[in-house]
Image: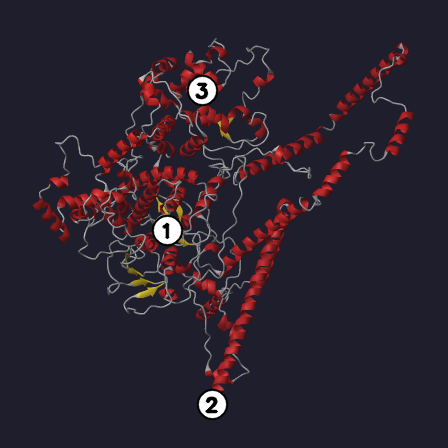
Amino acid sequence: MTHQSSSIIIERAPSPAGSSAPASQLLPRLGSRKQTDPAQNEIFKEKQQSTPPARHARNSTVHKSDEKYQSGEGARYITRKAALRKLQLTLRDFRTLCIVKGIYPREPKHRRRAQQGKTGIQTLYLKKDIQFLMHEPIIWKIREKKVHLKRIKRARSMKDYSMAKRYASTVPVIEIDHIIKERYPTFIDALRDLDDCLTLCFMFAALPRRKTIPSYLIALCRRLTLEFMHVVIASRALRHVFVSIKGIYYQVEFRGQTITWLVSHNFGFDPRDASEVDFRTMTTFVEFYSTMLGFVNFRLYHIMNLNYPPQLQGYTTEELENELIDDRVSLSDRVAALNIPLRSAGVSGEAAADEIELDQFPMSEDAEVADEARQKYEETKNLKTLFNGMRVFLNREVPREMLVFVLRCCGAEVSWDTSIFPGECLFNEDDESITHQIVDRPSIDKQYISRYYVQPQWIFDSLNARKLLPVEKYFIGVPLPPHLSPFSHEYRTHRYVPPEEKALKDDSYVLKEDIPIDETDLLDEDESPNVDDMIDNESDGEVPVDTEKNEKVQNMEVKKGETYRANKSKERKDYKQMHQLKEKMIRRKYRNLYKSMMQGCRGREKEIKLLKYKRRLHERRRFEEKKAAMKAQHVAALM
Amino acid sequence: MKARKFSKKHKSSWRKHIDDADVDSFFEDKRLTERLGKPFELRDDSELFTVDTRPGPLIRESILAPQLGAENSSLRCFQGLENTSAVPDPVIKRNTIRSKEQRQHPILKKKNEIRLKKGILKKKEIVQLQKYFHKRVSCLEEKPRRKVAIKEDLWAEKSDEPSKLSKLKSWFNETTVLHTVRNTSDLKEQSSYRPSAAETIIPSFETPHPGISYNPSFTDHLNIATEVSTLVTKTEKEERHLNRVTQQMFKQISSDKNEKNWLQEMAEGLPLNEPAVGVANNVDSDESEYEAINPPVCRDKKKTIKQRKKQLRLKQEEQKRNEAREQKKKALDICKIKSLMDEIKTEELKKEKKSLKRLQKSAKKFETPRRVGKNKFTVDGPIIADISELTGSLREIVPQGNILRDELKSLQKRNLIEVTKPQFKNKKKKMKKYRLKSHQETKDTNLNF
């Protein structure tokens, strides 16, 4: 039972009844244990848990403190220092391993107990987690690499450069593919954890070279992010865009998972201070996430039935070889241009899957939920083809990559000025078939009559609204409406909504800017028309109902018999009384809550009323002023 | 001065005392002439001078321009290796190896020169050049340190064949199985432990404030501005408070005064300043009798047997009385069962409520970052653009905030990594300072070491 006993030393568990050898005899074995499979320990540990601890069988002379922290919180946690000792790793390697394997520090319930009586705050890990780490084969790789790097260093200091070079070419590569599979057993799991991955990869792709970041990582991130953007375009998965001062937020949807990430603005980059960000930690994260993104990209391309690595439509490798230029460089440039669709290996799988028609009869009982879902589905379906048939030309001053990505995600064809990007442009500025030109300057000299000149915000707002917004609001040089966040929810609905905001959100609502003033009205001063009616027709739903009723009354034939006439005031009174009774029935527990709720409600109503009144006054004053001005003009004309 | 006599017994002693410097210098000179060639006096004019037939550039245009004839001279590091001696090669017939260029036929050489002048390149040369330039460019590219393109689907469905271990397990006893597979890789499949996720339930993507839009609505901007201003006032208040309870609590005094005070405090109670008072105190203390806090037991105060018996009797009586009272209470409590039950009920209800509250609290606990390390997590304030920067144009955005830092903070917030502080290496070595005795100042002895 040698293995069993060796595990005892590691686990520091009481010896099972089976082994008779005392712990002191077994201690020297610890050194030779290293090569044995750590997985065995776990099995035997599980076995031990089933056998009751033979605490009473121990020698009674053992000091009491030895018995402490054998179970409970004291045994559940392990300090970072102890973990390092156990794994025989340096702190840096341990940190890397934890990041890659997804082992996190913990906060115990009773810190003193978990720290085995020590006060202060130590970094604690679950003991089980550390035992789990012991199984990891890359620990051996890490050690191997350490030795290898030492060899290189030695050769260099011995000035044996040929040897150093030879060692440098054979540095062991630590592969983490199996860890990705282990951490994300299904593809959906990987998609769920893509937020951080994308934000970091996009950020690293935009970084300049620096000492702490391996240069290949930056290029790798750039390639992976471009590939991801291509697959987003191919599957039309983009749902929201939000341009903030921090960067650009994108939200995409894959297999029902929403993924949101942030991309920095591609200008005004300032190199970051090393004290602000721990670049080493971030690099470790990026190394892990880049591997993961590679696998995700591969899977996504295959789902979409596209070639991976990406190949562009209309370009074959033979063609490119014939051109006497470096094919790899030019191909990567063309991929980065984002304007040429990818070559698929057959019928697009996702596209076929998207053609599902929803059932007309909802299976669930809640019809509202089903209706909402249907509406959402229709909206997304519409969004995917929002810019279809549009040919867009980007002016020099607008950020190219972001706009090409957004436009292509909704089906537009995009081209740009040759001076911005080396990639192939589909059409030139003087092409008459261009429908829209994106401009971000106050005026432009030469304008074509056949196209709209709009500001870039029109694209984002249209995408977020899931419909093509009227271009007039976004014309060149026009002050833009605010760019609202698609992620924010309005929590306070009971509030005053000014007509301008209403018009912004609801296109069917027409803002009454100018009230027509008849010239005849100008003369008779006594009887001014009912301004209020003209200004604000925000009726509370009573007026149209009344008119309808009148019509009905007119159309009705007179019959014999008594018509039932509801006494409305009485009904109202009864209702009020009933309501009061109901209020009385509220349990004392909730009475105060109810009271405060009602009070708040009344307060808000009052506020709305007050603001409405103020608005009315303001409109009236404006009307009067205008009228007076017009009258003065009229009088002047008559004179 | 009289010449000293030396022994001339041996040949070596003859040499020792004869001045042969003139002979040595003669030979030196001879060797030098061999190395450098003939002395200048003996050379012809044609060997020393050349006749300028054409005017050349006399003065260098700038210091940066190459020296005249520099292109022909070898590198300085190799100049030491060159043979400058005029001594002829002792081996008259030596096999010299000509370089590739020297070996080339002069006609072909000239032809090539003309071709290169015209800018015509051979295909071989083009490839060579391309290789060279590609090498220069490729250092900027992603290096295939690992497999560049991923060629397998990690999540592809594989055939579910039962593992060897599970097959064995269905037939054999567990101990037998372990015995068989102990040193094989099959045992690895056994470990089914998966590390749990981090404790907090904070989402990885937190919705951005609508006020950080590059073209925000007025209310959104106002909201974020109020948020920032409240945060600033709060921190300012905290700072003021800290200042009040720390710095302002203590008076600042000069070092002289401090020293004086220190001396005074240290000398407190010593009979240096007030000898008279000290004497008087001593007199007072002598008068009062010393009394211990816990005086020793006195044998004379022992209780008598009678007293002890009485004490015991009283104690027993008291016990009896208490017992009787207890019995009576028990009898009476039977009537009070209903109220007691009520009491228990309310107590239980209270407990239940308390536990529920605790549960809710503990559930809410995980919405905030936990303390997992030495350093506490601190929140960065929201970013806000200056109103003058919000022009509504995409072209004129002034980017704010640091995405990488936010990401790091987010990771720390979710307890995926512990909060760390940047460690800067102290490059200055700690030196032990001391003064040499010879350099000590004599007058000022109050030095602060």
| C-alpha span from label 3 to label 2 | 106 Å
In the image, is B308 to the left or to the right of B418?
Answer: right
Check the picture and name the quadrant holding the N terminus of chain A: top left
Mark 3 and mark 1 residues within 8 Å of each other at the beta carbon: no
* Residue where numbered disc 3 is placed: A46
* Residue B123, quarter of the rendered image: top left
Amino acid beneath label 1: Arg
The amino acid sitting under disc 3 is Glu
Mark sitting earlier along the chain (2/1): 1
Q: Report the front residue among B48 and A464.
A: B48
Q: How is the image coloured?
A: secondary structure
State which chain disc 2 sits on. A
Image marks 2 and 1: residues in contact by CB distance under 8 Å: no
Q: Residue furthest right?
A: B287
Q: Secondary structure at mark 1?
A: strand
CA gap, disc 2 and disc 1: 60 Å
Residue A294, given in percent of the width and then of the height, sits at 32, 39
Name which residue lies at 68% across and 44% down: B245
Q: Residues within 10 Å of mark 2 (few under 14, many from 20)?
A: few
Label 1 crowd bin: few (<14), some (14–19), many (20+), radius 10 Å: many
Q: Decide which of tag 3 and tag 1 comes sooner along the chain.
A: 3
Look at mark 1 in the image and give the residue it sits on. Answer: A239
- Using the numbered discs, state the Cα–Cα distance from disc 3 to disc 1 in whole angstroms: 48 Å
Q: Amino acid at mark 2?
A: Leu
Specify the label residue A638 is tagged with. Answer: 2
Q: Are marks 3 and 2 on the same chain?
A: yes
Find residue A151 and report its horizontal and vertical position in percent. 35, 27
- Furthest residue in direction front, as rendered: B2
Q: Position of residue B194 (x, y in %)?
A: 42, 29
